[in-house]
Amino acid sequence: MQIKQLIPTRSAIAHLRFVFSLFLFPVFLFALSQTPHADQSKVWLVFFIWHFLAFPASNGYNSYFDRDEQSIGLLERPPKVDISLYYFSLLIEALAFGLGFLISWQFALAVLIYGIMSKLYSHPATRLKKYPIISFLTVFFFQGAFIYWSTWSALNTGDLFQGWDSRFVIAGAICSCLIGASYPLTQVYQHEEDSSRGDRTLSLLLGYKGSFIFSGALFAGGLVLMYLFWRPTGDLYYFYQFLILTLPIFLYFNWWFYKVGQDTRHANFKNAMRMNFLSATCMIGYFGWLVLAA
């Protein structure tokens, strides 16, 4: 390896997809909203580790092995990957792991585990992406509950083995349902390319209609869990506020489902990105409001 290979090219920077971290930002905000008297230095460090190092490293590593030629998340025309993407993604992942020790060894371990699972997801030797159920469960757990639990622990006690109660578990399950609900919709426009590579994604397994039904069912499950999360506290106002702020997601989802039912060409990159950004905006609005209200 040459030193210059550690310097990312413009293509490598594009494939890190830093903006994609916005889609996982609501999970961080949810954990922060449940953290009384948060240490601001910890908050910013944990945020930086996840959103500027670990998540982009995962995006870059996946892109290097996927070598997509058609649209992927946030990149309508992805540039050709080069070796700097591989080495730079490993470099910033190592930096994320090292900085994790400034929080606790448990948090550093969580960052390492997340990185390992992202590699298993895309590396040709394992490529979990080829298996629809396993790949879904990997994303469902590790981008949802796992991120919530490890972030909450990092911001509070620093110990992953403390704080476990029913509300803690439910909060993680809410995050997994919300992340899982978007998962097949991020694949619904990639059927042709995924098939050509031999990747049997969940959206391919479910089909266009099944992808939307599955997504809607998981979101509904998230709503039920959100109700169960707030009911014991007597603060159902927060649940009703969630319903109000996520109403645009519900309306756009149903419009898009209707359009795809008429013509599957509507299952395209632009509509999927609109769905992602609308969902992220509404979720950030709600969980950001929770942080301010805490």
Image: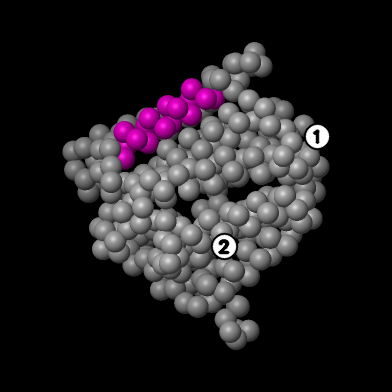
The residue that mark 2 highlights is 57
> What secondary structure is the stretch in magenta mostly built from?
helix
Q: Is residue 110 left or right of residue 74?
A: right
- Residue in the image at 78% along x and 40% along y: 157
Of labels 2 and 1, the one closer to you: 2
Residue 172's spot in the image, x, y percent? 58, 35
Location of the N terminus by quadrant is bottom right
Q: Is residue 191 above or below residue 125?
A: above
SS assignment at label 2: helix
Specify which label sits upstream in the sequence, 2 or 1: 1
* Residue situated furthest left in the rendering: 262
The residue that mark 1 highlights is 37
* Residue situated furthest top in the rendering: 234
Q: Which residues are magenta?
A: 211-226
SS assignment at label 1: loop
Q: Is residue 101 left or right of residue 117?
A: right
Q: Residues within 10 Å of mark 1 (few under 14, many from 20)?
A: few
The answer to whether any part of residue 278 appears in the image is no
Residue 149's spot in the image, x, y percent? 64, 40
Name the one closer to the observer, 1 or 281.
Answer: 1
Q: Which mark is residue 235?
A: none
Q: How many marks?
A: 2
